[in-house]
Image (tube, rainbow, N blue to C red):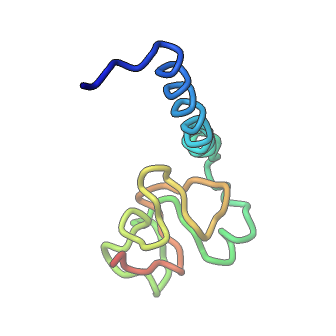
Amino acid sequence: MNSPQPPRRRFLIQAAIATSALPLLGVLGSETAQAQALKKLPASNPQAIALKYVEDASKTTEAAHKPGSICGNCQFFTAATGACTLFAGFSVNTKGWCSAWAKKA
């Protein structure tokens, strides 16, 4: 027959499971905090200037711009956070564009 676990043993098992989950909560919490901490990419950013970033793709005069190419459909853009891997620590406008735009696969 299966006898129920004594309350102390059950508590120790549950405590071990909860303790092992704490590092995972820390990782998830830091990603959320990092996503909230992203600032809008300033136009004066040297990387933005070098890549000819514009907040509104419809207003660019660059010959390299193709109709329909915006940050929102670029492989470097992360929709969940608004971040672009090319501009670390900053968020970009979904409707923006830069010369490094590459179609999302």
Can you say whether 59 is above or below 15 in the image? below
* Image-quadrant location for residue 34: top right
Query: Could you tell me which quadrant the N terminus lies in?
Result: top left
**Whole-percent x and y of residue 53?**
57, 69
In the image, taking residue 69 as reference, residue 61 lies left or right, namely: right
* Image-quadrant location for residue 43: bottom right
Residue at the image point whose x is 62% and y is 47% from the top: 38
Can you say whether 48 is above or below 31 in the image? below
Query: Could you tell me which quadrant the C terminus lies in?
Result: bottom left
* Image-quadrant location for residue 3: top left
Can you say whether 64 is above or below 51 in the image? below
Residue at the image point whose x is 64% and y is 65% from the top: 87
Image mark count: 0
Residue at the image point whose x is 48% and y is 55% from the top: 93
**Whole-percent x and y of residue 13?**
51, 28
Residue at the image point whose x is 48% and y is 77% from the top: 61
**Whole-percent x and y of residue 7?**
47, 13
Viewer-closest of 99 and 79 = 79
Viewer-closest of 55 and 8 = 8
Which residue, as the protein is rendered here, is positioned at the far bottom? 63
**Whole-percent x and y of residue 84?**
55, 63
